[in-house]
């Protein structure tokens, strides 16, 4: 896990049956995207195995996209896994929740699921990630970013900031009041 985090490599799961990354000869990519309403007030994002990049914008268009890359032993296995690895979008009034779900598979594979999101600057954001980078920029509202083993970078956020990670860099630049926590990693905070 630490090596994958530091190198930005795909996330692999092994089985007791024995296989290596060199066995994964087939690859597939899939992109899913959708618009975000301009009246959105709150965004919650949960992603475990890929980057989250959120940008605040004044005029739009607003939307999100998920890029999935999967490697497996066969093309059929790669397509099957990719088709079951998706981002569920639940819109309730002015609140959007994006949740990446990972299928349970015993077949050898590795994958990455990256989210690119553009929202109105006034949206309050909460993110939860585990093994990849979280980057949030250009918002006028509060931001909470939690990551377990990936880098976190927050820039140009005028609201309150709460950010935490472990074993990776935590960088904050030009934000409102901030509460920062990092376990076994550096914190670089400027312009709070």
Image (cartoon, rainbow, N blue to C red):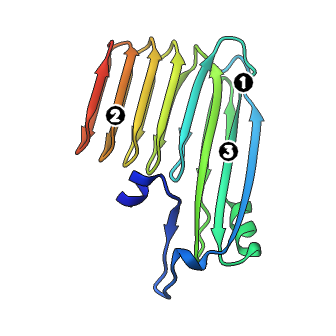
How many numbered discs? 3
- Residue picked out by circle 2: 170
Rendered position, 150 above or below 63: below
Q: Position of residue 132 (x, y in %)?
A: 47, 47
User: Do labels 3 and 2 touch, CB within 8 Å?
Assistant: no
Q: In this image, 134 relative to 3: left or right?
A: right
Residue, x 30% and y 45% (percent of image)? Answer: 166
Residues under numbered marks 2 and 1 in contact, where contact means CB atoms less than 8 Å apart: no
Q: Which residue is mark 1?
A: 62
Say which element carries label 2: strand
Q: Is residue 147 left or right of residue 56?
A: left
Instruction: Give residue 88's position: percent from left, percent from top.
Output: 67, 46
Q: Is residue 115 above or below residue 35?
A: below
Residue at the image position 67 percent from the left and 53 percent from the top? 68
- Give residue 121's quadrant in the image: top right
Q: Quadrant of residue 55?
A: top right
Residue 181: give x, y in percent of width and height. 27, 34
């Amino acid at each position: 896990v630490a090596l994958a985090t530091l190198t930005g490599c795909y996330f692999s799961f092994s089985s007791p049956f024995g296989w290596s990354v060199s066995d994964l000869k087939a690859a597939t990519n899939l992109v899913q995207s959708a618009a975000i309403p301009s009246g959105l007030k709150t965004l919650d994002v949960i992603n475990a195995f890929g980057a989250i990049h959120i940008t605040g914008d004044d005029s739009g268009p607003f939307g999100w996209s998920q890029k999935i890359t999967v490697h497996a032993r066969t093309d059929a296995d790669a397509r099957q896994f990719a088709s079951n690895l998706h981002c569920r979008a639940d819109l309730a009034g002015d609140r959007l929740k994006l949740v990446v779900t990972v299928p349970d598979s015993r077949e050898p594979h590795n994958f990455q699921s990256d989210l690119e999101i553009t929202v109105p600057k006034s949206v309050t954001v909460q993110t939860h990630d585990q093994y990849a980078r979280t980057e949030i920029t250009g918002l006028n509202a509060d931001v909470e970013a939690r990551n377990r083993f990936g880098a976190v970078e927050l820039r140009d956020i005028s609201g309150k900031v709460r950010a935490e990670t472990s074993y990776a860099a935590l960088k904050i630049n030009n934000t409102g009041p901030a509460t920062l926590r990092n376990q076994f990693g550096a914190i670089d905070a400027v312009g709070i």
